[in-house]
Image (cartoon, rainbow, N blue to C red):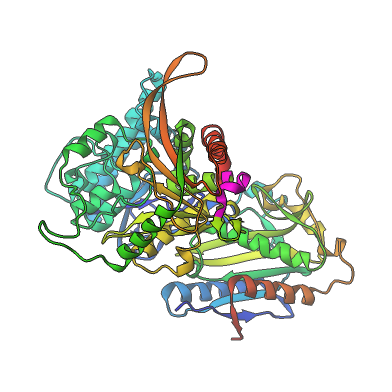
Amino acid sequence: MSHEIFMPALSSTMTEGKIVEWLKNPGDKVERGESVLVVESDKADMDVESFQDGYLAAVLMPAGSTAPVGETIGLIVENEDEIAPIQEQNKGKHTEGSSSDQLELPNKNSEIKEEKQKEVPQIKEQVVEVRKEKVLTLSKEIQLNASTSNNSSRVIASPKAKKLASTMGVDLAKVHGSGPHGRIQADDVLKANGQPVSIPWIGEGSSSASIATSSAHVQAESKSETLGNSFGKPGETVQFNTLQKAVNKNMESSLNVPCFRVGYSIDTDKLDNFYKKVKQNGVTMTALLVKAVAKTLKKHPQVNSSFSENGISYPENINIAVAVAMEDGGLITPVLKEPCNTDLFELSREWKDLVKRSRAKQLEPDEYSTGTFTLSNLGMFGVDRFDAILPPGTGAILAIASSKPTVVANNDGSISVKKIMQVNLTADHRVIYGADGASFLKDLSSLIENEPETLVS
Amino acid sequence: MINRTSIIKQPDKISFFNDVYKLQKRYQDALISGKSNTSFIWLGEHQLCYTFGRGSNMSNLLFSLDEQDIFKIDRGGEVTCHMPGQLVTYLILDLNNFNKDLNWYLRKIEKIIIKVLGSFNINCSTKKGFTGVWIGERKIASIGIGCKRWVTIHGFSINVDCKLENFDRIVPCGIEGCKMANMSDYAKNLDIKEVKKIVKKFIQEDFNFNYVSE
């Protein structure tokens, strides 16, 4: 049984790390907890240790090289007699590319490869791809050793999935990949291991999951295992739970508010590209959208205002509430406070923490009741548009639909395919007028379409 | 319950680098193995010595290696130099109790240093891509961290009033042409004991520590 050593994430903003030094040589005995190598990021060094007793069988990335976070950089085996076969396989790889430069190349190209660029690759790139494939099959074969199955086809899996599989002892060759081109995602591994899969309720917007190709779509549709939500059996009447009752009250109170709706179509190509880059640093689509909305609200205080008996009330802060459906019914709106003052990475962390604690029902009142503007995202279900009901005490809510490839007529008369996301603002007309809502959406759209990279801070 | 207790040690005499290094290691190992859950903070001064990070480029040392008082240690960053008049602070703490993010940790230390200098009315700043604290183009404080299972070792040094010529023998932090600065160039009647006190205070505030002596 072999275990992979991964390039660790030393910080949320780190995309790749430099291997400073291997403290062990291939063939060396390692104890659990013993440092095997040193990885550096900026002025900080981190010892990477072995998680089991065994032997360092292979060093896949030499000292001095750089590897993306999550990449397999070394292999540890439990028994001494397993070293030889792995080193044997490793030798082949080393004769093909032994200098650190050459070893680095495949990773730089991995992104290109995953996107399956249709352009004719240069010969050099082809060679590199072949090498990368060798490396991949190598590590796969090693994993297959553990099982009886001897599937010779390549297994493509995300780094997270690989990690999960190795910690859970799941054989990746037997896992059905639901990602693009059958890539195995972390959820697939969880599913294969019989563990509950994190439900996709939360606005982890595949509103721009960017890589959801049509083939993946068909796969998802053909699988009938995802049943709709139901709290009772046919013929039953089930009492509302407390949360459902609270939601009902809020929804009914909206009937006394003269609301109007205004919509916009936003091109998310740039946003998707940016998201692809920062996703590996733990940035969530929700955090990106919240940031964009908060930044635009700063310029449009009217859309952040609300009705009160004394007049138009302008809150001191911009706090964005995001609707999260609860598994057992009802919904909750955790609040990201002052997103303008928090950087994107911190915001993403905060959001993950809020979602986690929402599910565990551990939110403090001020963490779900202090929103000044609400987001509702159903993009992950592929909806093309919807409108949301205004929560009481606020002036507006934005409904975000899925981002879909759409044929677009450009201003110059040309036609192109762009990813278009429809958003729909519901607002209280007593405080927010049509022109306010429209100019807010215009600026939001311009921010998302033209300068998504400014959402970092 | 997170333990925010920290043992603090702040000798007034000059300490030998290697003794303190061993001491740091001992506290780091105790935290890693779970034998202890108290952090450890050390503030003091070293005799003249040069230290390297593990990834250091030896060409940044502008003299031959046969001299004593050169240490290769488990921290990030390039070569640096310690000496009397420079306040060195080491923090052995478990980032599992704070934020498992070394970038966060480095930035936090920079903020602490800026606050310390600020309380002596010295304006300084960080420089993107060049960890440490700067006054214009001159570097006044250096940072180098090591970490094992999210337990940190080493820390930062502030030039209070030291012989900056000692830096001429190296390329500090591997930055060619890097000029160093002393706090005493910008503030009058400085006492390193005062600086120590302020560093202690801000570390306590920023990490929410409860100090105890050994």
User: B145 and A398: which one is in front?
Assistant: A398
Viewer can see residue A229: yes
* Picture layout, residue A330 above or below residue B40: above
Q: Is residue A332 above or below residue B29?
A: above
Q: Residue at x 10, y 58 (%)?
A: A235
Q: Nearer the viewer, residue B193 or B109?
A: B109
Q: Is residue B185 left or right of residue A3?
A: right
Residue B82 can be seen, yes or no: no
Q: Give coordinates of residue B98: x percent, y percent.
A: 51, 67
Judged from this view, the residue extending furthest toward the top is: A413
The residue segment tinted magenta is A296-306
Image quadrant in which you'd find residue B194: bottom right
Which quadrant: the C terminus of chain B?
A: bottom right
Q: Quadrant of residue A196?
A: bottom left
Assign the N terminus of chain B to one quadrant of the image. Answer: bottom left
Give the image location of residue B210, x and y in percent. 59, 81
Q: Nearer the viewer, residue B164 or A126?
A: A126
The residue lying at 41 percent from left, 19 percent from top is A122
Residue shown at the point (54%, 62%) measured from the top left? B146
